[in-house]
Amino acid sequence: MKICLIRPPILVPAKNVLVSYTPPVGLAYVASALRNANFEICFIDGLGESIETRYPWGNDCFNYGLTFEKILEKIPDDVGMIGVHAGFSFDWPMCRELINLIRKNFPHVTLIGGGEHLTAAPEESLMESALDLIVCGEGEETAVEVAKAVEVAKAVESGNTNFESINGIALHSKEGKFFKTNSRARLKDIDNIAPPAWDTFPIHNYLDRGFGLGVDRGRSIPIVASRGCPYQCTFCSSPNMWTTRWVIRDPDLLLDEMEDLINRFGATNFDFYDLTFVLKKQWIIDFCQKIEERGLSFTWQIPSGSRTEVIDREVAYWMFRSGCRNLTYAPESGSPSVLKEIKKKVSPESMVKSVRGSVKEGLNIKIAIIFGFPNDTLRKIFESYMFIAKLALAGAHDVSIWGYAPYPGSELFDNLAAKNHIKLNDDFYDKLRTYGDPSKTTSYCENFSNNGLKTLRIIGLAIFYSISYLYRPIRPLRIIRNLIKGTQESRMEMGLTDAFRRIKFYLASSN
């Protein structure tokens, strides 16, 4: 049976700070699992197949990638099952329209969906779209079981497919009611998961341009060393998507995959997409030392944020020595009371010490901060200001300060929804742009207005960068030098490069 997997184009507000052109690592894993189960895979990467294309979507947003018409043209006529990924809730209205168009053009083909948003809001997603079912959570085993059920039904020419016995899915029952099967247990042996099927993707479209989740340090390809996160931060949907089971791969097997990617695709940089990568000190030191023992030469980054409890001078030394150049710390807040409320088990003082040591060892550090949690106050924001100032003095290179966004599937989202403060609809999805579009900062805290929260964010950025550049005046000069040379070392340079690219894009398209 032929299966078509679709990664939709990405939806980006016109004033978003950064556009992330990232290969779809989750779907690449699913593609590999289906192929190993002897299914024929056709993959349509709505972004990667037309990265240079941008077209208006409405509400001051743009789609980057293939048009829906092009996607429909690429779906094979003899396809037996179609799978669509829907990760970010902000993208859902766009993904939903694509799904409904696919159903209109392929009325009798089994249409399934998966990803973080669909896992977090399965009932609403099924009600709003033409999906037959949703794969919830970790998708490899579930997708294979669903595909086998579809194949069996086609073989016996039956119109009825036995989905309800498959764990880990959501669908409408035969009576038309929402039905969610038993949760599927997480995959037990992470080292036996087949590596991503990058050969089914236009991966070179990303590699040739240096696109990825992290700073452009060459031909960047995603890599995953662990799955899950043992923590239960209330603003995060990870416990709903992955549970709190954290597992990490054998470092030698991980490096085998990385060497293979170097040989096959000429990768020179690896972006780790892990939710929580640095958790065991001895593991990370072993990993770094094995890179040196193998005589490998590449750079690697942790751009999405990581725990920092084990990153001391020794760990930072080995990380830099083995090729790590960029690391994001994600404390979210510098207020002890906020950290307790959001169940973020970090110590601000320990983090300052870790940042200082990492910078001294040569790592380029970005800090991720969130303002506007539901119980935030000015006093708590001021505590974060003090923390931000200390991080600037410690040598952190960049900071991002965003307004809190209540993502479906998180504990805080459920609390706000229970109080009728939010409701899943297109207006709510659009407000999630607060994470990347500073012009549309939205406050979910009764103590701050939208403009008030925006002002507090600007003040925080001013505090950080004024201290950072006052104590290290060479840094802005290096940024200018790198921009002129077309190279990147920091997230600031990454953001500015993308902004200039989009300005050129806009000027070219307007002419």
Image (tube, grey):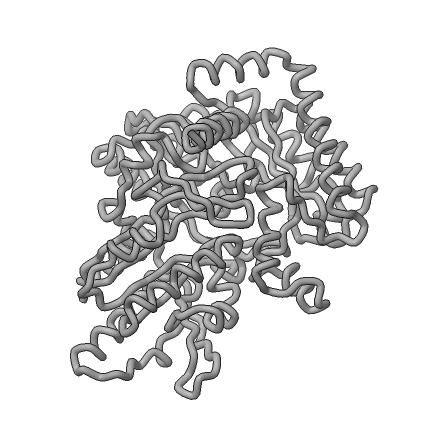
Residue 208, image x, y percentages: 30, 30
In the rendered image, the vertical position of residue 232 relative to residue 473, given as above or below:
below
- Image x and y of residue 196, in percent: 29, 49
Q: Out of 370 and 61, give the one closest to the viewer.
A: 61
Question: Which residue corresponds to the image point at 30% horizontal and 43% vertical from the top-left?
Answer: 49
Labels in figure, total: 0
**Could you tell me which residue is drawn at 26 percent across and 67 percent down?**
81
Q: Quadrant of residue 254?
A: top left
Above or below — where is 430 with respect to 147? above
Residue 40 in picture, x, y percent from top left: 18, 60
Residue 318 in view here: no
Residue furthest to the bottom in view is 175
Task: Identify the residue at horizontal 68%, vertical 64% (top origin).
Answer: 415
Quarter of the picture holding the C terminus:
top left
What x and y, as percent, mark residue 314? 52, 28
- Regarding residue 510, the answer to whether it shows in the image is yes
Say which of 227 and 69 sits in front: 69
> In the figure, 289 relative to 434: above or below?
above
Screen quadrant of the N terminus: bottom left
Q: Nearer the viewer, residue 225 or 309?
A: 225
Q: Residue 376 vs residue 202: left or right?
A: right
Furthest-front residue in this view: 511
Residue at left offset 48%, top offset 73%: 127
